[in-house]
Structure formats: structure tokens, C-alpha cells
Amino acid sequence: MSALLAGAAVLGGALALRLWAARRAARAQPGDPAGLRTDDGVPLHVEVAGPPDAPVTVVLVHGLAARSGMWHRQWAVLREHARVVRFDLRGHGRSGWAGRPRGNLQHLAGDLGLVLDRCAGPGPVVLVGHSMGGMAVLALAGSRPELFGTRVTGVGLLSTLAGPLAVAGTGGRAPLRTALARAAAWAGWLVSPLVDALHPVRTGPVRRLLRRRLFAGDPPRDAVRRMTGSWEHTPTAVLTAHLPGLARYDRRGVLDALRGVPVLVLAGTDDATIPPTAAERLARRLGPLARLELVPGAGHLVPLTHPGAVTPALLDLVDRCRTAPGRRTS
């Protein structure tokens, strides 16, 4: 009995510490006061460029621990051909954080939907998401499927997947692997205040680990510098808040909403975070309007390291999506 009480006390203390860390992160990340404000009061930093009367608007969504600036090479080119919107996810870059101890892909999907409604203009929209940003796009397809094929006339899914992360490279179901991933995610979530105090991203071993997981070969120095800076400035409470949700992630059931629009599925052949086989399965599930592109030698951060392959692929997607809203592509 005493052991149970001690365990409960330790767990209660860890949860209290975790809540304190989340609130501390919210105070440190108040967000852009001029930003678009979500229903729960979080200010989102949003940028819009390109001709206001462009026939298509492209909305760019970055991934975990990144920021909207990761799209700088695509941003510079796309805005010459379309209206372009990019924003920092909540808790990232210049956006705020609500102080929630746990993150939720549905919150990100709601934020994306708000940006689409308020900032993307009245015409056709192409949604482009990288990694967790792609997961947010799929979460939006699950919560608002009526947008796809009417308002959303095209989708770009870069270095992302629809199935569980734990079995991304196995091609099948692995209950033990999934259970272990979920346990590790919850453990990381609980100890994040201690991790934050140690600033692990600023240490050499962790930087080298991130470089191996996110890049491949000899990446451009600017790409490494940008991503390292993003990791260092994203609060650990924000990073770990998403771990339990990512461990439970599975959006294979929403893919039917995308089958009526052109989709670009793009990944690096040397991605050590989400294997290219996941992109191949995703493209097959999406059907004949999905176009698969694998970038040789690229790692997970392919928009940063291989803009010469990613930007033309996005321009091609925009060209495929120049249809009026309300007209479903077939």
C-alpha cells in the first residue's frame, strides 16, 4: 500500500511539474500581438505575399520544431506565381502557446482551418504540409472533409505519412512496437521539465543525433543552421506536448477526402525519420490523382536541403490545381 501511495505521489508531482512547465512555456511564448487569434486565444504569426488576385493561394505548413521561415526558398518563387500564406504553428516561431500540458493535432488542424478561412482569400487553395504539418492537413481533412475538392483543390504532403509512426517502416501492424512508442512518448512528456533545464539541443551529442535523423549526406550549412536555431528556440514543453498525440497518430481513415484532388506526395530517399516506403504507401492509398516524387539523397528536411527538386514540384502542383472553387477534379 505504501508503495502505491509513493508511486501516486511521484506521479502527481511529475504531473504538477509538467503543468508548471507548460505554463512557463506559455509565458515565454506570448506570440505576435498582431497575429491572427485562435478560438482559445493563441496569436498565430501569419505572412501573406503574392498577387491578391492570383488564381490560386498556397498555404505552407511547417513541421515540429520548425518555423514558417523553413519555406524561404519556396516562398520566394511561389509568390511570383500564386498568392502564398505561411504561418508559425502554435508554440513555434513567433506564434503563441496556450500553456497546455499536451498538444493535439486537432488544435493544429483548427488553426490551419482558421488561417485558410481568414487569410487565404476566396479562391482555390493548395495546402502544403511538411512532416507534422502534413499530419495537420490530414487532420483537417478528417474534421472538415467538405473543404477538399471544393475550396481545397490540391494538397502537397512532404516527408509525412497517414499511418502510425511506430510502424512506418514495417508495412504492417506491430502492436508491441506501437505500445513501446506510446510509453516512450508519455515518459518524454513527463520528464520534459528536467530535459528543458538541461538544454540538450545545445549539446554536441544531441545536435549530432538530430543531424543524423533530419539530414542526409552533406547538407547545406544554411539548412543545418536554420533548423538547429529552430530546435533551440522551441520550448521543450511544446516539443514534448506533441509526443503522446504523435504516438497515437493514425489518419488513414480520412484519405478518401483527398482522392478527388491532385496530390503531391514527396519524400527523400534517405529520410531516417519517416522512411520513403511510407510515402509510397500513401500515394497508392490516395489513388490515380496522387503523384509520387522521391528525391534522391534527401533526408527528412527536403524543402530546406533540396529546393531545386521541391520548388518545381510545388509549381507543377499549382499548375494542376488552377480550377475554380466548387469544381471537383476528376
Image (tube, rainbow, N blue to C red):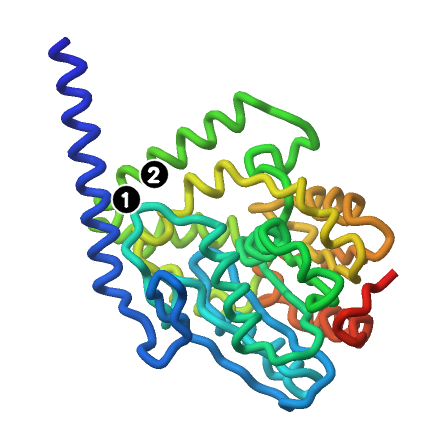
Instruction: Inspect this view and state whether residue 90 appears.
Output: yes
Q: Secondary structure at mark 1?
A: helix
Residue at 65%, 79% (x, y): give it. Answer: 122
Badge 2 crowding class, 10 Å Cα cut-off, few under 14, some 14 to 19, many 20 or more, is some
Residue at 46%, 63% (x, y): give it. Answer: 66
Q: Is 72 situated above or below 111?
A: below
Residue type at tag 2: Gly
Instruction: Give x and y (percent) for residue 284.
Output: 80, 45
Q: Secondary structure at mark 2?
A: helix
Q: Is 64 situated above or below 84?
A: above
Identify the residue under disc 1: 192
Instruction: Give x and y (percent) for residue 91.
Output: 36, 61
Q: Between residues 231 and 285, which one lies in front from this camera angle?
A: 285
**Contact between labelled residues 2 and 1, with CB atoms less than 8 Å apart:** yes
Badge 1 crowding class, 10 Å Cα cut-off, few under 14, some 14 to 19, many 20 or more, is many
Identify the residue under disc 2: 188
Instruction: Give x and y (percent) for residue 59.
Output: 60, 71
